[in-house]
Image: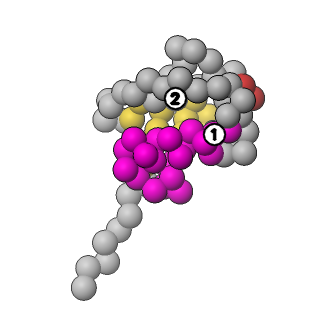
Amino acid sequence: MKTLVGQVHELAISPYETIEQLYIRASDIYDVPYQDIRAIYAGKDLMSYKTLQDYGIHKESTVHFVFRMRRNNGG
C-alpha cells in the first residue's frame, strides 16, 4: 500500500480478499475511517465488492490510497 505522500506499508493478503477488506486494513494502519479511503491500481478506482484477484493484484503489486478529507465546519 502506498499513499500519495509516499508512506508505504507491505501486507500479506490473500488474493481472494475483497477490496473492502483491504480498506479496513488501511483504516487500521492510517487511522482513517474506511469509508473515506479510495484505492487505485493501474489507474483504476477499485470497487469494494471485488477481490484483489479480480484486478490482477498479486505479490509485489502496489495499490495507491487516497484519503477523503473531512471539512470542519467550525463553531
**First in residue order: circle 1 vs circle 2:** 1
Q: Can you tell which quarter of the image residue 10 is in?
A: top left
Name the residue located 38 percent from the left edge and 58 percent from the top edge. Answer: 69
Q: Identify the element where label 1 is drawn.
A: helix
- First to last magenta residue range: 18-38
Image mark count: 2
User: Which residue corresponds to mark 2?
Assistant: 63
Q: Position of residue 18 (x, y in %)?
A: 68, 38
Q: Position of residue 20 (x, y in %)?
A: 62, 45
Outermost residue toward the left in this view: 75
Confirm whether the magenta stretch covers residue 31. yes
Name the amino acid, label 1: Ile
Q: How is the image coloured?
A: secondary structure
Outermost residue toward the top in this view: 60
Q: Can you tell which quarter of the image residue 21 is in?
A: top right
Name the residue located 39 percent from the left edge and 35 percent from the top edge. Answer: 3
User: Which residue corresponds to mark 1?
Assistant: 19
Name the amino acid, label 2: Val
Circle on res. 7: none
* Label 1 with label 2: CB-CB less than 8 Å: no
